[in-house]
Amino acid sequence: MKILKKYNKILLVDDDYDLLEQNKLLLESMGFSIVTAESGEEGLKVFKEEKPDAAIVDLIMENADSGFILCHRIKRTEQGKKIPVYILTSAAYETGYKFSASTKEEKEWIKCDGILNKPVSVEELISKLESF
Amino acid sequence: MNNNNPHIIIIDDEKGLREGTKRLLEEENYTVDTAENGLKGIELIKKNDYDLAIIDLRMPDIEGTDVLKELKLYRPNTVSFIATAYASFETAVESTRLGAYSYIPKPFSPDELLHQLKQGYKQRLLLLEAERLKIEREKNLLEIAHEKSRLKTIIEAISSGVLLINKEGEVVYYNNATLHKLNIDRLNIGERIRGKLPDKIAAILDSFLVSDEYHDKSVTAQIEIIPQNRLVIDATFSPVPHPDGSFAGVVIVLKNITGFKQVEHIKNEFISMVAHELKTPIAAVLGYIKIILDDTIPVTYEQQHDFLSRSHIRLKSLLDLINDLLDISRMELKTKQREIQKIDIKEILESSLNLLEIEISKKRLEITTDIDYDLPELKADYAEISRVLLNLLSNAIKYNIENGKIFIKIHQSPNHLIIKVEDTGIGIKTDDKEKIFSEFFRAKNKFTRSISGTGLGLTIVKRIVESYHGKIDVESEYEKGTAFTIHLPINK
């Protein structure tokens, strides 16, 4: 696997501690530096402190829209505008409501660079980041 | 009237003949009454429905023909014979014109008389049978007349809509419920209905009307009349044949199934939530196993151990979840099959506390109880009430702080047994308070992150309490503590 040096530090935000740990470990084993947070609030704090090169954010955390709100806040910062921010969720699969953040309307209110559906493989994750 | 012996009256002023005939007939098993003149005869005729009557033509008071007229008036089915010594063709004609069955010339021989009476009695039986049939037929006619209005009343009373459409697509008949089911204001007999029908119903109707032949095949469809499950009907289309078997039209029966649909929707949502809750821990465990099995990922022995113990926790809580789900599904059955018995709430409390002893001592919690001395017996299902107390107590433990307190108060009001479980734990944020009884809701904050739970405990408690027509209240202050109070009706 080619390692993307341009994304050295990645922020992972997920309220499921286990999934967070696993993705951290997998990405670390590929040479990325990983910082984590377990809620939207904590995510913003870590983002500001660590200035990561990419962020992968869970959608439903303390609230159903925690991920959207965190993306908004990240994208409002100078650093946030420069980096890819993805939402990772199983909501689309479970509710049957599919959003992709690709239509004009969706881009109005979803301030992220893409939606990834859980479960996602590390390979898929990296290829997404690569294509940004 | 007539049992087996023919009942006969002899009306004759001639005593010898009267008595002689009586003796003769009684020997032949007739039941015989006699009258010595016309008026007495009429009197008896009014009292009894005789099978047969022998009437003398000439009597001192009134004529036999007058008696005959009266007889015909009151007893049209009594078979009568005119007896006279003045036999003549004219009298015979006159008597039969007045309704006599036959004519017996005096003097008559016993054989001749018995022969005549036998014939007359046959006639009597025929008349009675005809009378019976006539009454029956009249009754039937009356019933048919009633039947039509009765059928109409029945169809109007049916809560389902009944709509009859002929093969030209015109309304032939409908009941009032049809209008509600189709959400339309009015229908006119004879109007073409297609335009007023929802597309789906119109399409099925068309499929029936295109064919001229009658096929004995019904079609059922579920149709949403008002969107968002506000009115959903089940429409069954059945062809109606003419008496000769050819196709006459279609009858549509419309049933309101909105309630079922709403329940179905809630169930589906529940199932998708369940699927999510089942999938999440499995995904977590799978992730750990994958990492351990992947040789390219360096994992220390300590990390491996950590992953396995994390997996263990997730699987254990998955099992709890499945048990809770089973409880919920059993509860639905149980409201029908629960074992209601007299239960002692104090005993249930004690055994619940025993079960939780380890958790209580681990956190070094202090338990205080305040229980009324003279509590009423509760009639309920033991397992269900245990479940309520266990869930509340285990929450009071799980969400408590180290060295915290749990206060249990059980007392009674005039109509309720009141159980209060109060803790000194992390409390519930105001926003979360209304959500805590919903399926799978778990408050997410810095305290709850490390506490495992299925999100179904309070749902189960609430369902059980409400199934006994009780209620549950919650008071809570974030970071201070929570108190749940249950009111269970006392069945006296």
Image (cartoon, rainbow, N blue to C red):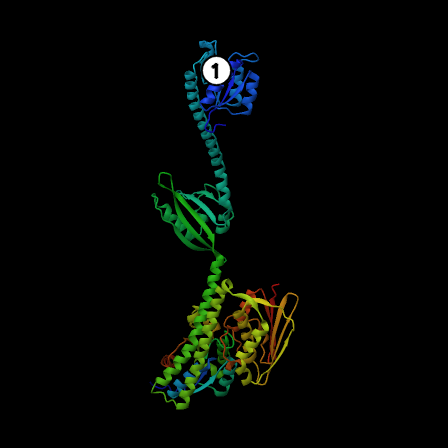
**Label 1's element?**
strand
Decide if residue B414 is on the left or right side of residue B111.
Answer: right
- Given the image, what chain letter belongs to the residue carrying mark 1? B
Residue type, numbered disc 1? Ile
Q: x and y percent of residue B26 in the render?
A: 47, 22
- Which residue has dot 1 on it? B82
* Image coordinates for residue B219, horizontal then vertical, percent: 38, 51
Image position, residue B441 (x, y; %): 51, 73
> Percent position (x, y) of residue A119?
40, 76
Q: Is residue B456 above or below residue B193?
A: below
Q: What residue is drawn where x is 50% and y is 87%?
A: A49
Which residue shows up at 46% across the image and 47% down it? Answer: B162
Relative depth, front residue between B240 and A1: B240
**Is residue B78 depicted above or below B254 in this figure?**
above
Which quarter shows the C terminus of chain B? bottom right
Q: Which residue is found at the position 52% from the left and 73% from the top?
A: B457
Task: Report how many numbered discs are placed on residues in the image.
Answer: 1
